[in-house]
Amino acid sequence: MNEYTVLNDVKLNFDEKGLIPAVVQDSNTKDVLMVAYMNREALEKTISTKKAWFYSRKRQKLWQKGETSGNFLIVNQILYDCDEDTLLLKVEPKGPACHTGNDSCFYRKLFSSNNQEDKSSIDGQNIDIIYELIDVIDSRFKEAPEGSYVAKLYKGGRERILKKVGEEAAEVIIASMSQKKSDTIYEIADLIFHLLISMRYDKISMEEIMIELKRRRK
C-alpha cells in the first residue's frame, strides 16, 4: 500500500499500482451505478472539477466519465471507508452510467434470496418483462415474420400504430369508468404494449424514458 495525503490531512491507502477503487452511487436514488479505479491525479481532478475522473487499467490512461457520451457524473460528495482504501462517490448522473445505456452497470441479477424484497419485481413478476417485450418488438420489426401482429402494425406505419395507441387509451378510460379492476388491468397492459411498439418505431429506448421519468420526481 502507498499512503497518500489528500484534503484535510486525510490519508488514503492506494495499492501497489497507485490505484484505489471508487464505488459510484446516485445521490438521489442510492443506486450503485458503477465501480472504477482512481489514481492520485484522477482524485485531484475530480475534487477540483466536481466531475468524476478515473484511471483506466486497460488503456493505462486517465479518463473523465462522459467525455465522449456526455453522460457526466457530477460529484456531490466523496467518502472513504474505515480501512482508508476504498472511496464512495455520491453523484448526480447526467445520463446512463453504463456504456450499455443502462442507468447502472449492475443491471443483471446473479442471485436473489426469496426472503429479500426485490424492488425490480411486482407480485413475483420481474419488471424485465418490459425489456423482453422490447426485444420481441425489435425482432418483429426486423424479421417481419408472416402472421405477426407487430410486424403488420409496423408495415402500416406511424399512422396505424398511433391509431392503435389512441384506441387502447380509450379502452383504458372505458374500463376504468366501469370500475372493474380486471378489465382495467387488461386494457392498461394493452396500452403499454402498443406504447412500446410506438416507442420502438421512433427508436426511443427504455433508458431514455426512465431518465425522463426520473425528472418528474422533482
Image: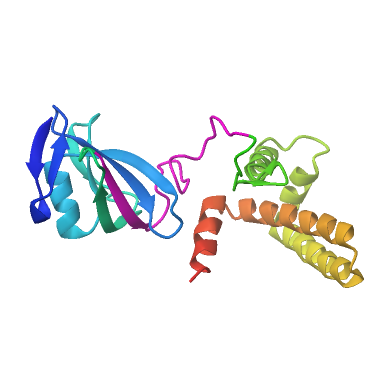
Tell me: 144 left or right of 43. Answer: right
Residue 142 sits in quarter: top right
Residue pictured at 68% horizontal, 35% vertical:
143
213 is higher (above) or lower (below) than 130:
below
Residue 61 in percent (x, y) is at: 17, 36
Q: Determine the residue positioned at 51% across, 68% down.
A: 217
Q: Is residue 104 magenta?
A: yes
74 up-or-down from 21: above or below: below
| Residue ranking furthest to the top | 16
Q: In the visual, does 5 lie left or right of 15?
A: left
Foreground: 150 or 172? 172
Residue 51 placement (x, y as % from top left): 24, 56
How many marks do you count on the picture?
0
Is any atom of residue 205 visible in this view? no
The chosen color scheme is rainbow
Identify the main secondary structure in magenta: loop
Does 85 sit left or right of 185 as displayed? left
Magenta extent: 86-113
